[in-house]
């Protein structure tokens, strides 16, 4: 069954209408995966020796153990939002004479072969090897690896179950929040104890059996869940929500563009994929914390970089696919009484609106001083005036349709990433840094850096973008009209 | 109303549509028939500028559709379910279309009131998004939405397909009454010879992208068509 399925997916790829473009995308995707895989592997190889050198008073493995729980929680969050078990493929096999049990075992095993499950091999395995090389016995090294791997693979099933069952999700969220608060505010060591557990595995390797048992239990629960719900209304169907007609009247203050804003808001709230992406874009708000808390160690360039991210999270996540979000009903939009100009302008407004909202939400950064916040503010002005258009330009060149109400497959978000879009990351990220740095370094009156000049230059560039908005919009309309038929053809491929 | 000159469409030197000249008059109900692959949907897609013609031009209401987008102001269409926005409720969808054609919420409500029979209590106030409706009910929404704001040109691709028998009959009555109400140029394609000869004043038969027959409908038309297709 697996081989015939593989054959089908190969045929789907080979017979795709835009094979050349897809091939290029696949190659870029491959490079992206290779990059992340490589980074993970390097991290896995290097972390143990580095910790041994830098914290000689502690056991390196103990330090690693103490943060494993954090990694696992992160892993669960990422899996919950992005990973999808290939259950929908079961549909075509339900009517064939294959025992249900075999179908489910097959699906569950195949779900283990996924990009989300490479961490044990790329990251934990090198650590385990290092452990063995560093005077631990082979049994200790293997059992340590086995236990963390079992936990990681358990998450594979937990995230699936949590996706199907709101109560389970609530339970997990409560446990994590309780554990965090008790640790943080009441000094009750719960999260830290997780680290002690891995320490104990190293000390008493037979304890490594426990995580393996946990893995088997979650496998069993998932198996039973699927077996009982293997029909079109249960595990295979999509949840039918109760719909309410909403008007979002509070948005009327935005005048004529309110109408489009409302619809985009509905798009985001009511569809799994955009909803998840927008939720993730909120994480960008915290991006600055990494840099500002270590301000002394950072160059000004890196701080500008961070500032752009804080207000630009929505542009980088949602904005990149802007016309593609409408791909399911693109033909409809193109025949309705909307001019290209109005349509593009509404998309510009949506993105500008999101930047403004992020900027308001980033007010707590005032804690790091007015200079820091002014930097965020000037970055936001750049994002409104120019970042929006650069993003939209990239989006117009994207010819990958998006299915709204299904989760993205692993790295599928990178699929809608053309070579040109790849290049556009440069102006979006590097241009603001240059706009800040060049004046800041040139007009320095003997100081090392002229912060004010940099900020003014960055903000000015955004204002220039806003002043010439009409001209930019006209250019975009021309590009849009030129690409229209190619986009319609591409979006029609389902 | 619509005039096409020397219109052809080919994919990789493979011609799928080739019409020398075709004029569709104001207020005409134009029925397009033909087997699969005859070029019906291609023709409609060209009229709506959804695909680019290989040669030739289309002028609708005095506007060249490939050059200006002003034809959108008086044209509406329902080709397939990609003309629906799945995450909206039917009401929201109607308001959306209404707003694009200059109708406010209460005007749309008044408009919908007159199509109550057609909806058969299956469309409004269902607490469901369009994506969760059955194919037939989705189609009802799409069809009715094309009449919002009294567009002068309405294009419907296979409007009778997927509809239940009651709704098919109601759709025929509805089309006839729309034509009677105002000057409407209606273009429909269909595989159902009965329906199309009943509502359309002119029938054009396509085969492999070429016009084989172009006639005003008479009592004999249905028989002629049946003879043609059974031959």
Image: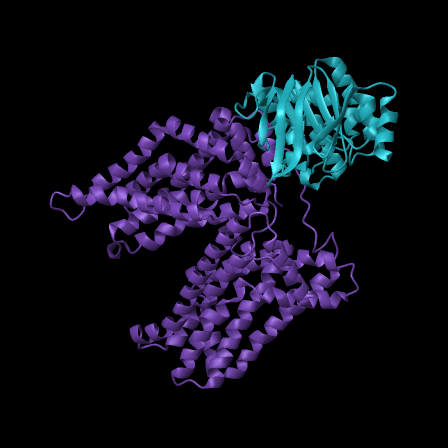
Chain colours: A purple, B cyan
Taking A436 as reference, is B195 left or right? right
Q: Position of residue B170 (x, y in %)?
A: 81, 25
Task: Please tell me which residue lies in front, A485 or B53.
Answer: B53
Q: Residue furthest left?
A: A446
Residue drawn at x 43%, y 75% as measured from the top left: A126
Q: Residue at x 61, y 52 (%)?
A: A15
Instruction: Name the residue located 72 percent from the left edge and 38 percent from the top edge.
Output: B37
> Is the residue A165 above or below the residue A208 in the image?
above
| Direction from residue A257 to residue A86 in the image, left or right | right
Q: Quadrant of the C terminus of chain B?
A: top right
Tell me residue A489's x, y (percent). Answer: 58, 39
Image quadrant for the N terminus of chain B?
top right
* A19 w.r.t. A224: above or below: above
Question: What is the x, y in percent for residue A409?
Answer: 56, 55
**Foreground residue, A114 or A227?**
A114
Regarding residue B84, the answer to whether it shows in the image is no
Q: How many marks?
A: 0
Residue A53 visible: yes
Vertically, is B130 above or below A415? above
Give the image quarter of residue A436.
Answer: top left
Left or right of A321 on screen, residue A453:
left
* Residue at image location 59% in from the left, 59% down from the top: A171
Q: Position of residue A349 (x, y in %)?
A: 45, 32
Query: Is residue B88 or residue B125 the one in the foreground?
Result: B88
The answer to whether A392 is drawn above or below residue A110 in the figure is: above
Q: To which quarter of the image does residue A329 belong?
A: top right
């Amino acid at each position: 069954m697996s081989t015939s399925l593989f054959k089908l997916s190969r045929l789907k790829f080979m017979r795709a209408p835009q094979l050349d473009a897809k091939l290029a995308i696949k190659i870029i995707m491959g490079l992206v995966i290779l990059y992340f895989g490589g980074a993970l592997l390097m991290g896995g190889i290097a972390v143990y020796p580095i910790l041994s050198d830098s914290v000689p008073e502690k056991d390196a493995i103990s330090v690693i153990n103490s943060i494993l729980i954090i990694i696992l929680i992160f892993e669960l969050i990422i899996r919950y939002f992005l990973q999808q078990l290939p259950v929908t493929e079961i549909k075509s096999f339900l009517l064939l004479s294959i025992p249900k049990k075999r179908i489910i075992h097959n699906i569950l095993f195949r779900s283990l072969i996924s990009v989300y499950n490479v961490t044990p091999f790329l990251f934990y395995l090198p650590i385990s090897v290092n452990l063995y090389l560093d005077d631990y016995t082979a049994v200790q090294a293997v059992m340590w690896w086995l236990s963390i791997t079992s936990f990681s693979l358990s998450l594979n099933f937990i995230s699936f179950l949590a996706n199907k069952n709101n109560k389970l999700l609530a339970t997990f969220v409560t446990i994590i929040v309780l554990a965090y608060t008790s640790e943080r505010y009441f000094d009750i060591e719960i999260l830290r104890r997780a680290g002690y557990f891995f320490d104990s595995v190293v000390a008493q390797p037979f304890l490594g059996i426990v995580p393996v048992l946990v893995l088997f239990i979650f496998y069993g629960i998932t198996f039973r869940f699927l077996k009982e719900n293997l029909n079109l209304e249960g595990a295979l169907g999509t949840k039918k929500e109760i719909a309410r007609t909403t008007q979002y009247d509070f948005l009327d203050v935005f005048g004529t563009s309110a109408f489009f804003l409302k619809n985009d808001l509905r798009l985001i709230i009511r569809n799994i994929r955009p909803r998840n992406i927008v939720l993730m874009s909120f994480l960008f708000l915290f991006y600055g914390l990494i840099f500002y808390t270590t301000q002394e160690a950072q160059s000004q360039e890196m701080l500008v970089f961070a500032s752009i991210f804080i207000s630009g999270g929505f542009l980088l996540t949602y904005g990149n696919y802007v016309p593609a979000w409408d791909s399911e009903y693109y033909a409809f939009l193109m025949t309705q009484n909307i001019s290209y100009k109005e349509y593009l302008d509404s998309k510009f407004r949506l993105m500008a609106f999101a930047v403004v909202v992020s900027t308001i939400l980033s007010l707590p950064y005032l804690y790091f001083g007015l200079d820091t916040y002014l930097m965020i503010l000037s970055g936001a002005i750049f994002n409104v005036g120019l970042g929006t258009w650069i993003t939209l330009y990239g989006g117009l060149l994207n010819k990958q349709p998006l299915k709204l109400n299904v989760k993205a497959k692993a790295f599928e978000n990178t699929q809608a990433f053309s070579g040109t879009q790849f290049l556009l990351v440069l102006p979006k990220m590097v241009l603001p840094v240059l706009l800040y740095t060049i004046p800041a370094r040139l007009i320095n009156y003997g100081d090392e850096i002229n912060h004010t000049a940099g900020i003014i230059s960055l903000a000015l560039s955004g204002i220039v973008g806003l002043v010439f908005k009409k001209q930019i919009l006209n250019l975009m309309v021309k590009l849009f009209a030129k690409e229209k038929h190619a986009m319609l053809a591409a979006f029609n491929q389902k | 109303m619509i005039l096409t000159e020397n219109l052809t469409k080919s994919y990789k030197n493979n011609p799928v549509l080739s019409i020398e000249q075709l004029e569709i008059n104001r207020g005409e109900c134009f029925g397009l028939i033909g087997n699969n692959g005859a070029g019906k949907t291609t023709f409609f897609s060209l009229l709506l500028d959804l695909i680019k013609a290989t040669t030739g031009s289309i002028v609708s209401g005095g506007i060249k559709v490939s050059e200006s987008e002003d034809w959108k102001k008086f044209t509406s269409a329902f080709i397939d379910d990609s003309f629906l926005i799945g995450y909206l409720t039917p009401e929201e969808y109607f308001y959306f279309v209404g707003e694009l054609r200059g109708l406010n919420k209460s005007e749309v409500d008044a408009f919908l009131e007159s199509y109550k029979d057609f909806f058969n209590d299956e469309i409004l106030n269902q607490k469901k998004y369009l994506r969760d409706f059955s194919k037939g009910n989705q189609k009802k929404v799409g069809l009715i939405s094309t009449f919002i704001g009294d567009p002068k040109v309405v294009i419907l691709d296979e409007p009778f397909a997927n509809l239940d028998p009651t709704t098919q009959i109601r759709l025929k009555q509805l089309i006839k009454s729309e034509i009677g109400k105002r000057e409407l140029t209606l273009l429909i394609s269909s595989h159902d010879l009965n329906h199309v000869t009943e509502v359309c004043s002119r029938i054009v038969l396509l085969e492999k992208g070429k016009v084989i027959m172009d006639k005003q409908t008479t009592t004999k038309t249905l028989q002629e068509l049946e003879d043609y297709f059974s031959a």
